[in-house]
Amino acid sequence: MKRAGILAFALWLCSGFGQATELAFLSLSDLQQVKQQLAQHRAASPTLAAWQQLQREAQQALKHPDPSVIDKGLLPPGGSKHDYLSLSAYWWPDASQPAGLPWLRRDGVVNPASKNDQSDGVRLARFSADVQALTLAWYFSGEQRYADKAQSLVRHWFIDPASRMNPNLNFAQGVPGIADGRHTGVLDGRYFATRVVDALQLLRTSPGWQAADQQGVERWFRDYLHWLQHSPLAQQEAAAPNNHGSWYCTQLAGIAWYLGDNAAVRAMVTLARGKIDQQIRADGSQPYELARTRSFHYSYFNLQALTALAQLAQKSGNGDLWHYQNAQGGSLLAALAALAPYSDPVKPWPWKNRDRVSQRIIPLLSLADNSLHQTRWESAIARTDWTAFSGSARGAVEQAQRDTWLISLPYGQKKGQQ
């Protein structure tokens, strides 16, 4: 880098990043600390590895065409391709019926028809991942091309009249022969909260982001929040006792936080206490998730939602979900303690299961330590092997490493540098 470029980057690094407001699920102070470590070439090896992987993903995202829900092959039942459409992953045609209808459920067995470009499920996941990767790549590097592409993606998906998604999930996780859309499809929208909201908070300080952009995305998210709060499908999801109910709380709370609606955040924290009442036993087990054929995945997945919401509740002043205990003695911390030993891949998982990525537990343990200013799970974090995975688990392991070491830092690591 030439001297002028180094000076410009140093000024940008010290600028406080435009004084971005606090984020929903990420920690701005952690991001700032990691950015400094990377710039000063003193990042820990897991952080550096995660940063290099993020750069590769951002480079690929630069090459992707801006996606839109209108790109799908199927026409939603409402007649507009601007409506989001997805098919439920675990449902299959009934071979005993001439037309295969109605489809039958095979829990944990993914139907490839739910994962192609004919519907929007994979498209939404890719879009939100690209927005997040590009925004973080810009944040850490200062390279404007990443922010420019992220802004283009956001405008194309949320704002441009010809390509924008209608702010609803009326036709999400449909099942042919049974329902055009189901309440379980509300889960698809979790990425709007966990990936997109914080990216938008960062992008609003980036060059090229206009007042009209901010107004456009806020308008979309206000309309979508209204749908989450009032749609009959969404209300059924709010009542779900398992991970679906947890993710409803977390999704709505993250979007409400972005829009400055603290009362809605508080309502979701209250609702989440009811989920803990229903879900977690005194020994920390989660019966609804252990009943699934992918019991390890869903045990982790439910806690991913609850730990994210516990962090948001804490920073927004809406109560302490970390220590909340139900009448049976079950709690979020008890559930984490029950799952933590299985972060060691050598320890056998005693319930029925189809897949297991042990590293996925680590970001949850690190988040708990950070939120509670403790090093309870420091040893589990330290011994994690981020290079041990099968081909199909690569993305999950890389994401877990990023969540632990790049967009956050383990508490023991931060404490040691104080």
Image (cartoon, rainbow, N blue to C red):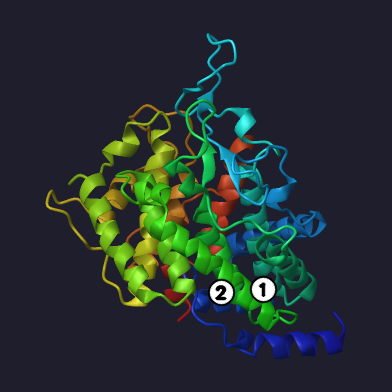
Image position of 309 (left or right of 63): left
Residue 57: quarter of image: bottom right
The image shows residue 145 at horizontal and vertical percentages of 80, 71
Q: Which disc, if any, is residue 78? A: none
**Residue under numbered circle 2:** 31
- Residue located 53% across and 43% down the image: 172
- Residue 390 in sight from this viewpoint: no
Q: Which disc, if any, is residue 140? A: 1
Specify few, some or many for label 2: CA neighbours under 10 Å numbering under 14, 14-19, or 20 or more: some
The image shows residue 417 at horizontal and vertical percentages of 48, 78
Residue 139: quarter of image: bottom right
Height in image: 370 above or below 178? Answer: below
Measure the C-alpha gap from mark 1 to mark 2.
8 Å
Image position of 364 (left or right of 85): left
| SS for dot 1 | helix
Q: Mark 1–mark 2 contact, CB under 8 Å?
A: yes
